[in-house]
Amino acid sequence: MKGLNKKLKELTTLCGIDACAIVYSPYEPQPEVWPNCLGVQQMLAEFLRMPPKDQFRKMVNQDSYIRERIKKTDEELKKKIKENWELKMTAVMYQCLIGNVSPANLSMTNLNDLGLLIDHKLAEIDSMLESLKKAVPADQNHCHSYINHRRLSVCSNITNDHLMARGVPGHEHSLEKQPMGGILDSMDEMRSPKYFMNLLMGPD
């Protein structure tokens, strides 16, 4: 009870609100109150003067509070599972690009997941390109043509790897035909937005 009273005091002081507590115990005939009986009576009277919808708007009991926390935890868990899946498949994609892993050795489940990730990355590239086009003045149409050319180049590289990973005839060796150069020396560099911007816009 002392710990609860301390927290209530801190809450009322830091947040500038009114609060009271009535704590029942199976070992005591009378409930314990905070800050005192008069303060509790005043708080209850003020509470009862509120409209019913305001009284119960944010009211919770132990059961509803636990249910709310479980729901929130489930949502966070689903989010983490999705993030872990994306990190795992991104690592697999980079390993395939640099030749450390052969798509032929991946399971069908991993190949399907890899295809989903590649489609997601292509959608992100399209979104970035649309943003770049909007940022370019209308009288610089040649810039639009150059960006579209870079898009076709980037999408071609990724799509070839996608087709090769899915075992499409004619694309079995697409990874070996692509000169990776220095841009694939570091997976951290590939993850950065600057890498993708350089890849799209080309060298200065």
Image (spheres, rainbow, N blue to C red):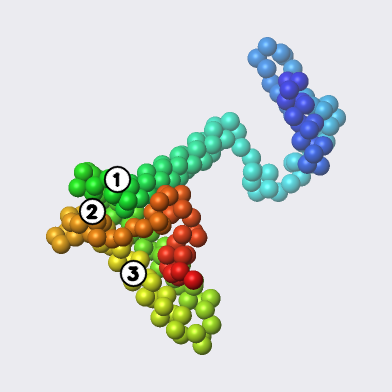
Give the mark, 3 or 1, whose residue is nearer the N terminus: 1
Q: Where residue 122 sits: x, y (%)?
A: 36, 63
Q: Which residue is depicted at the point 33% across and 71% down? A: 152
Foreground mark, 1 or 2, reads 1
* Residue drawn at the location 23% of the way across and 49% of the way down: 103
Gap in angstroms between the C-alphas marked 1 and 2: 14 Å
Q: Sequence order check: which comes first, mark 1 or mark 2? A: 1
Residue that label 2 marks? 165
Which of the pair 78/172 is nearer the observer? Answer: 172
Local crowd at mark 1 within 10 Å, few (<14), some, or many (≥20)? few
- Foreground: 6 or 29? 6
Label 2: state its secondary structure. helix
Residue 85 to residue 28: above or below: below
- Label 3 and label 1: CA atoms lie apart by 23 Å
Q: Could you tell me the amino acid type at mark 2?
A: Ala
Residue that numbered label 3 is attached to: 153
Lower sequence index among marks 2 and 3: 3
Q: Position of residue 16 (x, y in %)?
A: 81, 42
Residue 80: horizontal and vertical position, in percent?
45, 42
Residue bearing the label numbered 1: 100
Q: Is residue 71 visible?
A: no
- Looking at the image, the residue that sits furthest to the top is 27
Q: Amino acid at mark 3?
A: Ser
Side of 33 where 66 appears, left or right: left
| The quadrant where residue 118 appears | bottom left
What is the three-letter code of the residue carrying label 1? Answer: Asn
- Of badges 2 and 3, nearer the viewer stands 3
Indicate the secondary structure of the residue bearing disc 3.
helix
